[in-house]
Image (cartoon, rainbow, N blue to C red):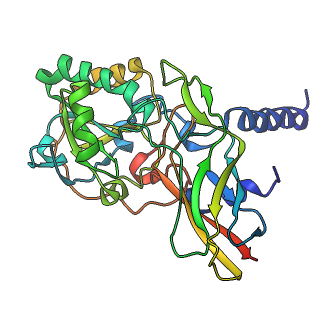
Amino acid sequence: MCLCLPSLWAQGNQYLIAQAPGKLVAKRGASAEAKIAVSVEPGFHVNSNTPSDAYLIPLKLTWASGGALEPGEIVFPKPQMEKYEFSDKPLSVFTGDFDLTAKFKVPAGASQGPGIMLGKLRYQACNNNSCFPPKTVEVRLSYQVQ
Amino acid sequence: MSALRLGAVLLTGFVLGCVIYGCSPARVKAASLKPDGERHTAPDFALKDADGKTVRLSDYKGKVVLLDFWATYCGPCKIEIPWFMDFERKHKDQGFSVLGIDMDDEGWDAVKPFVSDVGINYRIVVGNDSTADKFGGIEALPTTFLIDRDGKIAAVHVGLTSKSEFENAIDQLLQTPPHNGGIIEGRARPAGGSRRVSLPAELVGAR
C-alpha cells in the first residue's frame, strides 16, 4: 500500500479507506461488477459483515438510489477469525487490504452515458485495547453505460 | 560511550519503540493517581438514566466516582464492566459509585438489552457528543475517569486497563477525605490535540 495512506487516514479520524475503480463500463441489459479496494489502518481491525456477536456493528456497503445502475449483492471476502486481548474467543474481522465486490444490473432502458453511484461504507474499528465509534466513508463509483 | 553516541542510541530506541508499540496517546496507560495539585475539576453534566431520571455528576459530591465512557459494541469495555460491578458491590458503602456513560448512537435501544443481559448493578446514563466534548472529546472506548471526593479528576485510563490498577487507585482515593466538601463545578476547556484522544492537558494533567 502506498506511503500516502497514513495521511489519508489522518483526515477525519478514519481508520479505513475505500477506493472504487477508475470507471466501470456497463452495458444496457447486462450485469456489471466493481471491486472496491478497502484498506484498514495497520494495528486496527473492523468487524466483518457477519460479526461474531450480536452487539457488534457489521461492515456494510449501501448505495444511494438514483443512478442508472441497480445495486445488487455485495460480496465480501472470507473474514479472518482473530483473537484479541479483550476477547475470550476469536472475532470475525477484516484487517489490512481487501476487496469488496459490488454487483449491479443495468436495465435495458437505462440512459447511455456517464454517471456516478454514491455509496456509504459503514464500519466500526477497534485496536487491541480500544474501540472507536462507528464511522462511514463515502464511495464514489464512476460508470459509463453503453 | 560518548554523549553523542548515547544520544543516538536513545533516539533509535525511541523511534523503534514508536514503530513497535505506537506513539498514539490511546496506547498510553495512566500509571497512577495524579498528585492533588495537578487535579482539575470534573465537568458537570445532566443525563437521563434508564428510568428517565436526570443524573448529574454533581449529585455524587463527596464520593469517589468511577466514570466509564463505554458502548455495547466495545469489546474492551465488556472486559472491564464485570470488574466495575465488583467494585460497586465491594465499595458502595464506603462512598464509592460507578457511573457508566453509554455512547451508542442508538441510545437506550442498544443499551437496555445489554444492561439486562449482563445484569449491570451500577447506574448507566446515555451520553452524547456534548458530554464527550465536556471531557475533552472522547474517541477511544473505554475511557475511564477516576474522580476524587472533591470532584476532581484523579486519573484517566484510555483503553483496556488492568483490574488491579483500578483497584489500587480506588483504595487510595477512598482513604482520602474531601478537602472542600466535594463540590463539583465548572467545565473543562475545549478539546484540542491528539487525533485518537483529545483530552486536554488541563483536564487530564500529567499521565
Residue B10 in the image: state x and y as whole percent. 79, 33
Name the residue: 49% across, 43% down.
A58
Residue B112: % across, % down: 21, 39
Q: Is residue B16 above or below residue A87?
A: below
Which image quarter: residue A35? bottom right
* Residue at 50%, 49% in the rendered image: B197
Q: Nearer the viewer, residue B181 or B87?
A: B87
Residue B106 higher or lower than B116, as above or below: below
Instruction: Write the residue at 14% across / 40% down.
Output: B60
Q: Looking at the picture, how far across and down is residue A103, in whole percent?
A: 64, 56
Left or right of A134? Residue A73 is right
**In front: A42, or A54?**
A54
Q: Is residue B65 visible?
A: no
Position of the N terminus of chain B by quadrant: top right
- Total numbered circles: 0
Examine the rendering and report whether any part of residue A108 can be seen. yes
Q: Nearer the viewer, residue B116 or B158?
A: B116
**Image coordinates for residue A64, horizontal then vertical, percent:** 51, 68
Quadrant of the rendered image containing residue B190: bottom left
Q: Nearer the viewer, residue A34 or A85?
A: A34
